[in-house]
Image (cartoon, rainbow, N blue to C red):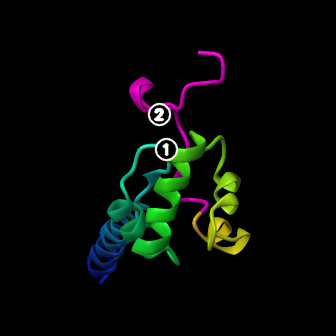
Amino acid sequence: MASIRTLFAVLAMVWTGLVAAAEMVETVNINTADAETMARVLNGVGLKKAEAIVQHRETHGRFDSAADLTAVKGIGESIVEKNADKIVVSEMPAEKQKASPGE
């Protein structure tokens, strides 16, 4: 009987590991991702809002934090908060960065 309990315990641990691996959160870099990727990954962000994010990024330059997304029309604090674990902010490739005034 003890070996059956051991078997069930091992199976339970394996199942837990598989479930945890399946729940890994996909992330998106808001300074480099295209609209389709952002729309797919971010909850509450459809293609139209994702295109607005890309347009804002191209017009105003890189985002310094996830909270900067609230400057985009249609993106509020609640969207940023519910996607906090999915949003990555890192440097943009040099050729895509908006030139600073005076350059």
Q: Name the residue rendered at 64%, 65% in the picture.
A: 80
Quarter of the picture containing the N terminus is bottom left
The image quarter in which residue 37 lies: bottom left
Question: Is 50 situated above or below 64?
Answer: below
The residue that label 2 is drawn on is 92
Q: Is residue 63 left or right of residue 54?
A: right
Q: In the image, is residue 69 part of the stretch drawn in magenta?
A: no
Question: Would residue 43 be seen by someone viewing this image from the given angle?
Answer: yes
Q: Residue at x 49, y 55 (%)?
A: 55
Q: What number is the disc on residue 50?
A: none
The part of the chain drawn in magenta is 84-103
Residue, far top: 103
Q: State which quarter of the image contains the C terminus.
A: top right
Q: Nearer the viewer, residue 31 or 100?
A: 100
Q: Position of residue 51 (x, y in %)?
A: 44, 64
Q: Which mark is residue 31?
A: 1
Q: Is residue 61 above or below residue 68?
A: above
Q: Determine the residue positioned at 69% across, 59% down.
A: 71
Of helix, strand and loop, which one carries label 1?
A: loop
Q: Are marks 2 and 1 in contact (CB under 8 Å)?
A: yes
Q: Is residue 23 visible?
A: no
Three-letter code for the amino acid on which mark 1 is drawn: Asn
Seen in the image, is 15 located left or right of residue 25? Answer: left
| Residue 89 in the image, given as x and y percentages of width and height | 55, 43
User: Per the image, is 88 magenta?
Assistant: yes
Q: Residues within 10 Å of mark 1 (few under 14, many from 20)?
A: many
Majority secondary structure in the magenta region: loop
Q: Residue 91 location, x and y as percent?
A: 51, 32
Instruction: In this rendered view, identify the residue nearer to me: 60 or 79.
Output: 60
- Badge 2, how many Cα within 10 Å: few under 14, some, many 20+? some
In the depicted structure, whether residue 61 falls above or below residue 10? above
